[in-house]
Image: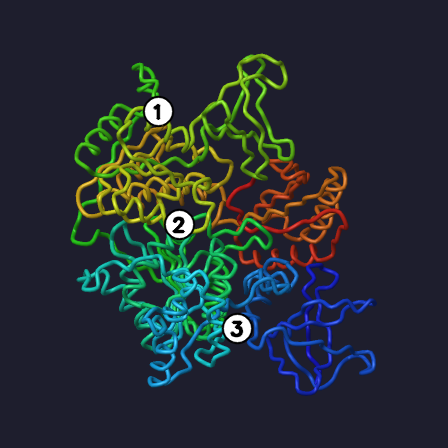
Amino acid sequence: MFAQVVVDIEHSKIDRIFSYMVPDGMDAAIGSRVLVPFGRANTAVEGYVLGFSETADIPPERIKRIHRVLRKIPEFTENQLKLAYRIKDAYMTPLVTALRLMFPAEMRGERVSELTRRYVALNLNPLDLMAAKESLVAKDGKIKAPVMAGILDMLGETPTALTALTDTFPSAASAVTAMEKKGWVITFDQETGRNPIKAISPHGDTDFVLTRDQINAIEAITKSENGHFLLHGVTGSGKTEVYIRCIEHCIRSGKTAIMLVPEIALTPQMIAMFSTRLGREIALYHSQLSAGERYDEWRKINSGEAKVVIGPRSALFVPLKNVGLIILDEEHENSYRADTHPKYRTHDIARMRAEIEGARLVFSSATPLVETYYEARTGGLELLSLPKRVMDLPLPDVYIEDMRKELREGNRTIFSGRLYDALVETLEAKKQANLSINRRGVSAFVMCRGCGHIVRCDDCDVSMTLHNRDAHGTLVCHYCGRTKPYSNICEKCGKPYVKAFGIGTQQIEYQVNRMFPKARTLRMDLDTTRTKDAHADIYRKFKNGEADILIGTQLVAKGLDFENVTLVGAMAADISLHFPDYLAVEKSYALLEQVAGRAGRKGSGRVVIQTYKPEHFAIQFAAKHDYIGFYEEEIKQRQQLSYPPFGTIIRILFAGTDEAQTKAACETVQSGLKNALAAHRTDILVFKSSPAPIKKIMTKQRYQIVMKIKNTEDIETIKQKIYAELKNHQFDTVNFGIEINPPNMV
């Protein structure tokens, strides 16, 4: 028998199937990871079995044999393989690149394995145990071997870990060895699962009284076999309870479920809520688990022990079998877009997997993507609404503060008068506050006021951001991580006029500590959540009342539920309005509405939006909690400009170390595309090549081709012609990839 194998080498020239002979008795299956000889040197490389055949296209004497199967359990299921093929075609990526999404990276190269511990167990019946203990007592009544006696006392009916014995008796290891020789104990190795959920305490209502809207939503979802839905519910309307009830129904029906959250920061809260109801049937899967924890959770999923998987977008690729429900919570979030190749959109992969599995699919948000809501309004999704908060709690009062007016009136601080007063009242009332800004660090950029020079990263064509305010402050590039020491001396003109401009989370934290010295603060941004369990630790501390003010980036706006928060401050609310992409207004509205939803979850609340553009419709509608009003205005502008959902933006991004070669590759592909799409010129509204807005990132020069195409009946034909043309091009020194409706154009 011959196995059809794709080797684990990520290169377009090797992106094909190779036949290998399966030795007699070898237990290989579809999805198995195997070690095979490859190339003229017969180098041992890893590969994946995709299928079997009784014949091969080449003579049997030329076919090499599989060395061995690396794991007894296949790495991926047949449905995952189908998904990988769909991803390969949709994103023009090698099949092995798609397959690598399906399991932890550490499994490649055997970089992670099961955790085992040494255990000790009694090997004596009760009479012999009594005799053993008596033999350790001297004639004068003293214990001759106190460590052995102590170990015998500790060992009960169940085995005890050797580490537990050594914690009590430092010399336990040598004593156990001696006792094993006497036949008193036996030792053995046993696997010990690493449990990342153990530190998260269950909480949440178990006798929740459903609203009529929740009941309608649950019935619509559970009675459907494979329907696709948009659950549009205001913040605090009980969407999570709908998820739980639908998942419970799914499990009772013999199915499994995938629950996606946009950020790792939300998983502790979601796990805490779900574990109350579902216990050990939950698996947690995300990148900040240790390699061992992620491996154990993956095996728990692959073995069928887990019925529900919770995590960010990577959790969509797990080997969960018999999937009956996929939920995307906060479906509007940009983090559902992958920013490395393949640059997929989680929505699209979720649709693929739901179709393959025959599963229900639920997109959910208080501020749905305009494209998603348009699809629901035009019949592509079934629209389910939760228009009120549970227990009829009111939405928080929202105040728009014009920071231009504050400046004219002499207020030079980062707090408007209203926000400052509200913070004082909140702290005096022993309540909590959230302060949010969509920028980390102390400042946005550093500039010399003498010559105008802006300090930029040497490897990326972007300004550097100041972190830490003291004399030892550091300039950081948020694209590649390069750092420079901060100095007020200009590197260009040599004068001491360098100053930081703009504000970030660290600056807000500094100002809060200066103006409210008794307030206890926590900060949640990328800088404070890099370490393992950092999200869960910050969440726990704030929920337990160990801080009065939580300061953060958009992380604090994404579904975190704190009952004692009565005040939210949106600092510099118009920052994202000026980003160079067609989604900028939508993102700004969603961020404001979401962060406003953190206030008054169990009572009254208020929100202060600070802005230099108070008249903008996104800010005005956010203040009124009016998503429908915002949608009607935004969809009208999208239609006028042929932006999605009325048009499709396609970006082909080229990157290489040599600028001339990168530019030449871009021009070559553009020429080929013009010929391939000649028959569709009237449908193509924009077709241009140029340097990327950020021309250099991590030493790579970047060029792009941007097309905007009307969504006519020919759009899929045009896409297929673009894909076909791109397959004709390969460059040794330049990489390129395609993005459909990219979330930003940096």
Task: Give the crowd class for mark 1: few <14, some 14-19, many >=20 residues within 10 Å.
Answer: some
Tell me if label 1 and label 3 are in contact, CB under 8 Å.
no
* Distance of label 2 from label 1 (alpha carbons): 26 Å
Q: Which residue does the image show at 37% across and 50% down from the upper left?
A: 536
* Distance of label 2 from label 3 (alpha carbons): 29 Å
**Rendered image quadrant of residue 515:** top left
Q: Which of the two marks, 1 or 3, is nearer to us in this view?
A: 1
Q: Which residue does the image show at 38% across and 30% down from the upper left?
A: 572
Note whether residue 379 is visible: no
Q: Which is more toward the observer, 152 or 589?
A: 152
Q: Considering only order in the chain, which callout, 3 or 2, is on the residue closer to the N terminus?
A: 3
On-image quarter of the C terminus: top right
Q: Vertically, is 134 above or below 661?
A: below
Report the residue marked by disc 3. Answer: 79
Q: Position of residue 721 (x, y in %)?
A: 65, 57
Q: Vertically, is 402 above or below 630?
A: above
Which residue ends up furthest to the front in the rendered image? 140
Tell me if label 2 and label 1 are in contact, CB under 8 Å.
no
Secondary structure state at the residue bearing disc 1: loop
Q: Which of the two marks, 2 or 3, is nearer to us in this view?
A: 2
Q: Considering only order in the chain, which callout, 3 or 1, is on the residue closer to the N terminus?
A: 3
Task: Give the crowd class for mark 2: few <14, some 14-19, many >=20 residues within 10 Å.
Answer: many
Badge 2 amino acid: Ala
Q: Vertically, is 155 above or below 169?
A: below
Q: Which is more toward the observer, 500 or 84?
A: 500
Secondary structure state at the residue bearing disc 2: helix
Report the residue marked by disc 1. Answer: 414
Badge 3 amino acid: Asn
Q: Which residue does the image show at 68% across and 44% down from the upper left?
A: 655
Q: Position of residue 224 (x, y in %)?
A: 34, 72
Q: Which is more toward the observer, 248 or 205?
A: 205
* Distance of label 1 from label 3 (alpha carbons): 53 Å
